[in-house]
Image: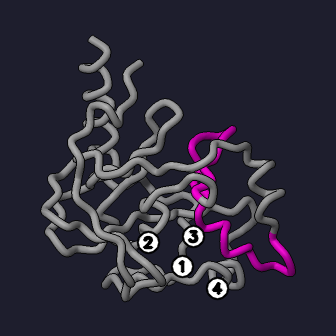
Amino acid sequence: MVQMAERVRPVRLEQRPSPRHGRGVFAASAISQHALVIEYTGELISHHEAERRYPVRNGVEDPEHTFVLELNEELVIDANVGGNDARFINHSCEANLEPIAIGNQMWLVALRDIAAGEELGYDYAIELDERHTPANKRRFPCACGAPACRGTLLRAKRAPVPAQVRAAHAVVAQRLRALAD
């Protein structure tokens, strides 16, 4: 199978300080809805290995844990090893990107048109095995500043998938079928 990176028109991005948190990634030019914006790169490792590398100590996650993105039920991508600028894309409760797995790659796809200069963000949608108690929500505070900010990086356990996210997944699936033909 041809790697998606070989089929994607490059999108111009810029990494710089973010008003949300630390460093952020910004669109250097306009990005069209459903564009494959950037691949989230890093070392493919098991969930078990990620937990070994970045353990929770005294109820606090290792800060480097934020660069680990789940690819599927077996693998995660550790952007601390071989990662690119995608690791600096911050969380947003009003995301303009959605991570979509394509084989053993994770692509961040534009959910809507994105203006030049706009900060990129996707919903980290962390879901813990245990209940999302007020204390757990405080462990994962959100600083996105969106009008609809939920105050935490945790995703509601039974929240429906937003229509624009379902649409992005459908468009990517359609493109993959077209490439396979």
Q: CA distance from mark 1 to mark 2?
A: 13 Å
Residue 85 drawn above or below residue 108: below
| Amino acid type, label 3 | Leu
Q: Which residue is mark 3?
A: 154
Element type at mark 1: loop
Q: Residues within 10 Å of mark 4 (few under 14, many from 20)?
A: some
Q: Residue at x 35, y 37 (%)?
A: 5
Label 4 sits on residue: 138
**Disc 4 and disc 2: Cα gap in Å?**
18 Å
Mark number for residue 141?
Answer: none
160 or 135: nearer the viewer: 135
- Closer to the camera: disc 1 or disc 2? 2
The image's mark for residue 90 is 2
Disc 3, SS: loop
Q: Which residue has dot 1 on it?
A: 152
Q: Amino acid at mark 2?
A: Asn
Q: How many marks?
A: 4
Residues tagged 1 and 4 counted as in contact (Cβ below 8 A)? yes
User: Are the two marked residues, 1 and 2, in contact with CB atoms closer than 8 angstroms?
Assistant: no
Q: How is the image coloured?
A: one colour
Q: Secondary structure at mark 2?
A: strand
Residue displayed at 57% across by 83% down: 141
Earlier-in-chain disc, 1 versus 2: 2
Asked if the stretch drawn in magenta spans residue 169, the answer is no
Range covered by the magenta-colored residues: 56-79
* Mark toward the start of the polypeptide (3 vs 2): 2
Residue at 57%, 49% (x, y): give it: 42
The amino acid at mark 1 is: Thr
